[in-house]
Image (tube, helix red, strand yellow):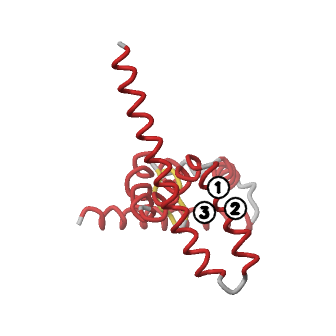
Amino acid sequence: MLAALLFFDEVFSTLGELDFVVRVMVFSYMLFWLYMTFKDAQLLFGIATIVVGYLIFVHGVSVTIVVVLWLIFFLLGSQLQMLMLFGVLPLLGYQQAGGKYVKESELMGGGGGAAQELEAKVKSGQASQQEQQALQEMYAQEQMQQQQMQRGRMRAGM
């Protein structure tokens, strides 16, 4: 039991030493980059060196997490965007309609209570000319959105 604990103690101390070596390497790279950036402004170079040293040696784990997240979003951003646009959103029932994403149920006829109220007014003959035109525009827009969805599905099927 004691031998196993000593083994893990040695492993953790080795990992700690490797962590320190990696931090020194990162600091030396950042120091070189800061020198190349601020070689004419020595005061800025000194202040930036102190800030970078503090961040790397005191907050090394959190800086590592931020760098990893930055790499994920910067290097894999287009893949994440494609996964969202063509994978997750269609699975959730969202389709692109005129530059925005809407639920398929909203496009297929659940246009909202306003359209149904206008339709009821038109049928009862209480709607004004403007309300009738607004209802016709809503129908035309809904038909265009349905045609766009059908074209998109036909393109996806090819």
Quote the CA–CA distance across marks 1 and 3.
Answer: 56 Å
- For the residues carrying marks 1 and 3, which lies nearer the camera in this image? 1
Q: Amino acid at mark 3?
A: Met
Residue 140 visible in the snapshot: no
**Viewer-proximal residue, 101 or 135?**
101
Task: Describe the element under mark 3 as helix, strand or loop.
Answer: helix
Residue 26 visible in the snapshot: yes
Q: Residues within 10 Å of mark 3 (few under 14, many from 20)?
A: some
Task: Describe the element under mark 1 as helix, strand or loop.
Answer: helix
Q: Label for residue 55?
A: 1
Left of 116 or right of it: where is 76? left
Left of 141 or right of it: where is 118? right
Q: Quadrant of residue 52?
A: bottom right
Which quadrant does the N terminus fall into? top left
Q: Position of residue 2 (x, y in %)?
A: 38, 15
Q: Quadrant of residue 158?
A: bottom left
Quote the CA–CA distance across marks 1 and 2.
Answer: 6 Å
Q: Which residue is mark 2?
A: 51
Which residue corresponds to the image point at 68% horizontal and 51% vertical from the top-left?
A: 114
Left of 124 or right of it: where is 143? left
**Viewer-proximal residue, 126 or 2?**
2
Residue that extends furthest to the top in the rendered view of this protein: 1
Q: Position of residue 153 (x, y in %)?
A: 33, 61
